[in-house]
Image (cartoon, rainbow, N blue to C red):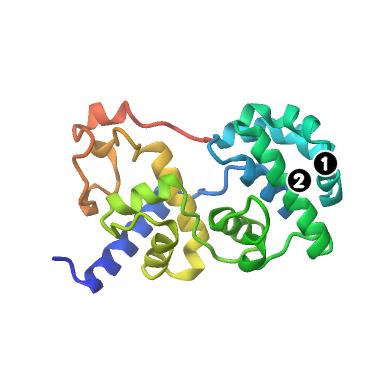
């Protein structure tokens, strides 16, 4: 059985390999300020970043401020974001979030986790995306890719995102939490797919207890690799 020390060492070695494999890993949502990132992250639920990025230029141009979102006509916003799916719920979340930011935070997106998660439509994942990428506050983005990969890595068998966040936070240095999240998400999108991971070309193969979940033959595995970006 792997000791705690051995797990920490393996996790940090895997992180170093991911850093070498994805030196440019970053948030693939397009934004220029915290408000834009917050809105884009709300839209990204059950939707690809690529689709969100196709919608946000029009959305951001129409609603440049928190006050604009707070006073938005729901039907107009729904028409802009419809292709992202769950557009009615997302519209309600965005307008509700903006009204709360306007009323409670002077129209400025807060930079504390507790304040962010208190906003309509904002959970820990969304809050950590904003904290890490808009404010430089380290945070782990525990999305579906992240959850799947850290379990495959044998780092945890937890299924609750908050518990996963705590476990991984104890393995990876805090200063790297944000960029580590991007590395894992990029790896999940490009190589370690949900159904058939490209094990035969995975740079983590020698350290991963799930090696063999997908084809191990290099030529066959290479065909499964999806080159980015997945904006």
Residue at image mark 2: 95
Position of 186 relative to 221 (above/below): below
Give the residue displayed 66% in from the left and 30% down from the top.
Answer: 54
Mark 1: give few (<14), some (14-19) or many (20+) Cα within 10 Å: some
Residue at image mark 1: 63
Position of 172 relative to 127 (above/below): below
Name the image quarter holding the C terminus. Answer: top right
Q: Is residue 174 visible?
A: yes
Residue 63 picture location, percent across and down: 83, 41
Give the residue displayed 66% in from the left and 40% down from the top.
Answer: 90
Residue 208 picture location, percent across and down: 24, 51
Name the image quarter holding the N terminus. Answer: bottom left
Q: What number of labels is visible? A: 2
- In the structure shown, which secondary structural element does the residue marked by tag 2 occupy? helix
* Cβ–Cβ under 8 Å for marks 1 and 2: no
- Quarter residue 19 falls in: bottom left
- In the structure shown, which secondary structural element does the residue marked by tag 1 occupy? loop
> Viewed as shown, does residue 82 lie left or right of 170?
right
Residue 153 picture location, percent across and down: 28, 53
Residue at the outermost left position:
1
Q: Is residue 31 visible?
A: no
Give the residue displayed 62% in from the left and 46% down from the top.
Answer: 41
Q: Earlier in the sequence, mark 1 or mark 2?
A: 1
Residue 200 picture location, percent across and down: 23, 37
């Amino acid at each position: 059985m792997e000791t705690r020390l051995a797990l920490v060492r393996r996790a940090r070695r895997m992180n170093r390999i991911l850093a070498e494999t994805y030196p440019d890993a970053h948030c693939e949502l397009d934004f220029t300020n915290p408000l834009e990132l917050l809105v884009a992250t709300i839209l990204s639920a059950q939707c690809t970043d690529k689709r969100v990025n196709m919608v946000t230029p029009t959305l951001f141009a129409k609603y440049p401020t928190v006050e604009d979102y707070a006073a938005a006509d729901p039907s107009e916003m729904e028409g802009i974001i419809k292709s992202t799916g769950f557009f009615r719920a997302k519209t309600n979340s965005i307008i509700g979030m903006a009204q709360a930011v306007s009323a409670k935070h002077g129209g400025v997106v807060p930079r504390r986790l507790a304040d962010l998660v208190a906003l309509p439509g904002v959970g820990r994942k969304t809050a950590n995306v904003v904290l890490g990428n808009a404010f430089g506050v380290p945070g782990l983005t525990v999305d579906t890719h992240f959850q799947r990969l850290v379990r495959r890595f044998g780092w945890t068998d937890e299924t609750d995102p908050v518990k996963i966040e705590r476990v991984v936070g104890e393995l990876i240095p805090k200063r790297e939490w944000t960029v580590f999240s991007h590395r894992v998400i990029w790896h999940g999108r490009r190589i370690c797919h949900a159904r058939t991971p490209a094990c035969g070309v995975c740079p983590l193969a020698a350290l991963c207890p799930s090696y063999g979940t997908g084809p191990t033959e290099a030529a066959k595995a290479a065909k499964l690799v999806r080159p980015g970006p997945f904006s």
